[in-house]
């Protein structure tokens, strides 16, 4: 890394010589508070800095761990609760929801603490500690013999939430305003891959003594602990990511050796960051976009499973898995191939507005496809329903765009870690609550046939319209439009 003057560093996307959460003695970096225009004015030398792809790919490998650990238990958790929990079959759904909600709530309560720990210990140590913790807790989950052990080990995995906030921050630090769209498209693509791989691990490796009797049938351990293999493999993925990160990932926090620990500035308060110009607006939009995303993710399998006369598609588990897999593949294509050039052309704000217009259209058309099935217009259904999933997958670009907007409104690079932690705290809170609320609304609508079973879609359309209105207040500095600066003589 070449040495740069302090003046040059002030204009970089993320200053590597300042800690994430501590306040700079010279005051906030210009990008956060001092730039009133809607464009980044980063010098050409910084904007043209190539993306360190090796470091980005290593961080993306570590990124795989969280979604794999979260989704790998989905195929078997209900069966596991029923077998080891000694509960009635009717109560299984309650306990599975409780376990996942407590996991998300545990993450939420500790997210900001992990962000601050990254300042004191460095980003790389926090990343490694978190990966090791997730590895151990995830592997132990498969050894649970009662409900309370399942809750304990799942919450323990939630304790080690430092991977999420640290990886986001390190990817931000490894990119410039010109390359951050590409960097975060890799980040989001990897998350989608984790969502795809996790259930495959859980479903294919659970109860191996019965699934693969020739290989595991004589191993009594797997008969006593039928889910240990699946969680052990997931834990091994996390352990391998910890080892790879320890060996090859570079620390992005370079401390200023001229400042002793006794005179180091105090961290900027969380409340002060939230009140910074533009931050409340972006956090509101961030919350609305994720509320729409998590709500649809929760009700989609239920909608596809429900009989057409009650307001759904009546799909078999096979078709539900096909639609889920296709949705993941389409999201990956949009985020990896379409998002970077589109963001370069119309900016972050342009993508957010474009996607926001698609949300209410998609939510309004979803019940319309059910009407086609009720009228026995199956050919029309099989033409429109897949196209509708393409539209829904395109809207996933808004998830990446809002992350870029969040980076752009950070008061300074010194607060980027805390701001990411605040946003992720909000995200995990929504992820814990939204599925319960919206699946309940869907169930109420189908059971009582309010609006012919379409009550939840009306609510989602109204929320989407609120999101469109909220995006009108997107700060100019979050528009994500780059302006090349003229070289100075």
Image (cartoon, helix red, strand yellow):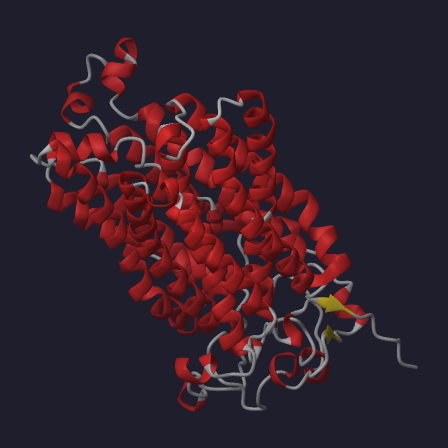
Seen from the viewer's position, the closer of residues 364 and 237 is: 364
Q: Residue at x 24, y 15 (%)?
A: 210
Q: Residue at x 19, y 17 (%)?
A: 219
Q: Is residue 208 left or right of residue 323?
A: left
Seen from the viewer's position, the closer of residues 380 and 407 is: 380
Seen in the picture, residue 209 relative to 397 is either above or below; the reply is: above
Q: Residue at x 46, y 57 (%)?
A: 290
Q: Residue at x 51, y 66 (%)?
A: 285
Seen in the picture, residue 242 relative to 112 is either above or below; the reply is: above
Q: Is residue 329 left or right of residue 198?
A: right
| Quarter-of-image position of residue 386 | top right
Q: Provide residue 425's location: percent of width, then percent of height.
A: 38, 65
Q: Residue furthest right?
A: 489
Q: Is residue 356 left or right of residue 224?
A: right
Seen from the viewer's position, the closer of residues 189 and 285 is: 285
Q: Provide residue 175's location: percent of width, then percent of height.
A: 65, 61
**Residue 50 can be seen, yes or no:** no
């Amino acid at each position: 890394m070449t040495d740069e003057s302090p003046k040059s560093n002030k204009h970089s996307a993320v200053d590597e010589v300042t800690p994430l959460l501590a306040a700079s003695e010279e005051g906030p970096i210009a990008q956060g508070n001092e730039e009133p225009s809607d464009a980044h004015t980063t010098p050409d030398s910084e904007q043209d800095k190539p993306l360190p792809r090796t470091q980005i790919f290593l961080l993306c490998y570590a990124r795989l761990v969280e979604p794999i650990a979260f989704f790998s238990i989905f195929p078997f958790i209900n069966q596991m609760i029923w077998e080891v929990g000694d509960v009635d079959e009717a109560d299984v759904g309650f306990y599975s929801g409780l376990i996942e909600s407590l996991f998300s709530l545990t993450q939420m309560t500790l997210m900001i603490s992990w962000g601050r720990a990254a300042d004191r210990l460095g980003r790389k140590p926090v990343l490694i500690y978190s990966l090791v913790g997730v590895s151990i807790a995830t592997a132990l989950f498969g050894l649970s013999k009662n409900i309370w052990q399942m809750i304990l080990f799942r919450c323990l995995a939630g304790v080690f939430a430092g991977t999420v906030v640290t990886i986001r921050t390190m990817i931000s630090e490894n990119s410039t305003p010109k390359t951050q769209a590409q960097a975060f498209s890799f980040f989001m693509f990897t998350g989608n891959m984790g969502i795809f791989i996790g259930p495959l691990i859980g479903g294919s490796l659970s109860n191996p003594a019965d699934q693969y009797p020739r290989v595991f049938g004589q191993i009594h351990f797997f008969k006593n602990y039928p889910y240990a293999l699946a969680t052990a493999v997931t834990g091994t993925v996390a352990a391998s990511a910890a080892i790879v990160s320890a060996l090859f990932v570079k620390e992005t926090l370079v401390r200023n050796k001229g400042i002793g620990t006794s005179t180091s500035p105090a961290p900027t308060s969380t409340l002060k960051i939230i009140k910074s110009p533009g931050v409340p607006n972006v956090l509101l939009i961030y919350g609305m976009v994720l509320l729409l995303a998590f709500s649809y993710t929760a009700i989609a399998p239920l909608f596809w499973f429900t009989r057409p006369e009650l307001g759904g598609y009546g799909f078999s588990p096979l078709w539900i898995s096909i639609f889920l897999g296709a949705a993941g593949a389409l999201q990956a294509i949009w985020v990896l191939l379409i998002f970077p050039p589109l963001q370069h052309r119309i900016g972050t704000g342009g993508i957010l507005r474009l996607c926001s217009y698609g949300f209410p259209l998609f939510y309004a058309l979803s019940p319309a496809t059910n009407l086609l099935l009720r009228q026995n217009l199956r050919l029309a259904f099989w033409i429109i329903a897949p196209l509708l999933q393409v539209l829904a997958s395109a809207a996933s670009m808004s998830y990446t765009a809002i992350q870029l907007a969040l980076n752009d409104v950070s008061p300074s690079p010194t607060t980027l870690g805390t701001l990411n932690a605040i946003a992720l705290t909000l995200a995990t809170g929504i992820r814990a609550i939204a599925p319960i609320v919206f699946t309940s609304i869907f169930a109420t609508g189908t059971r009582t046939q309010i609006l012919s079973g379409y009550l939840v879609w009306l609510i989602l359309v109204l929320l989407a319209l609120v999101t469109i209105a909220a995006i009108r207040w997107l700060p100019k500095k979050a528009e994500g439009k780059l302006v090349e600066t003229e070289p100075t003589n």
